[in-house]
Amino acid sequence: MADPAERIGSILGEIERTKGMVKSPDRRSAYLTPLYTQLAREIIDEVKKQVKEDIMKELRNEIRRE
């Protein structure tokens, strides 16, 4: 599986390519909506992963101090 930054960059690139190729607003919306949804999911998943890692790190530090 690719690095999160690569996946997000890939989705952003696909969004930009789609914007350039599709001129009709209805078709553009139909193509871009799933891409923006995928982008939001990738970002949210990465943030959740980072928060979980930070919490686990803090918990480990607390356990070691006791």
Image (tube, rainbow, N blue to C red):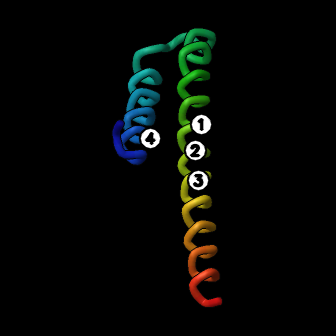
Which labelled disc corresponds to residue 17? none
Is residue 29 toward the left or the right of residue 17 in the image?
right
Q: Residue furthest front?
A: 66
Q: Residue furthest bottom?
A: 65
**Element carrying mark 1:** helix
Which amino acid, by three-letter code, is at mark 4? Ile
Q: Are marks 3 and 2 in contact (CB under 8 Å)?
A: yes
**Residue receiving disc 2:** 45
Give whichever of 46, 60 is nearer the camera: 60
Q: Quadrant of residue 50?
A: bottom right
Which amino acid, by three-letter code, is at mark 3? Val
Alpha carbon separation for disc pair 1 and 2: 6 Å
The crowd level at tag 4 (other Cα within 10 Å; few <14, some 14-19, many 20+) is some
Is residue 11 toward the left or the right of residue 35 in the image?
left
**Residue receiving disc 4:** 8
Is 39 placed above or below 29 here?
below
Check the picture and name the quadrant holding the C terminus.
bottom right
Give whichever of 35, 62 is nearer the camera: 62
Mark 4 or mark 1, which is nearer the start of the sequence? 4
**Residue receiving disc 3:** 47
Mark 4 or mark 3, which is nearer the start of the sequence? 4
Is 53 placed above or below 39 here?
below
**Element carrying mark 3:** helix
Residue 17 image point, x, y percent: 39, 25
Is 64 placed above or below 59 here?
below
**Element carrying mark 4:** helix
The residue at 56%/53% (across/down) is 49
**Element carrying mark 2:** helix
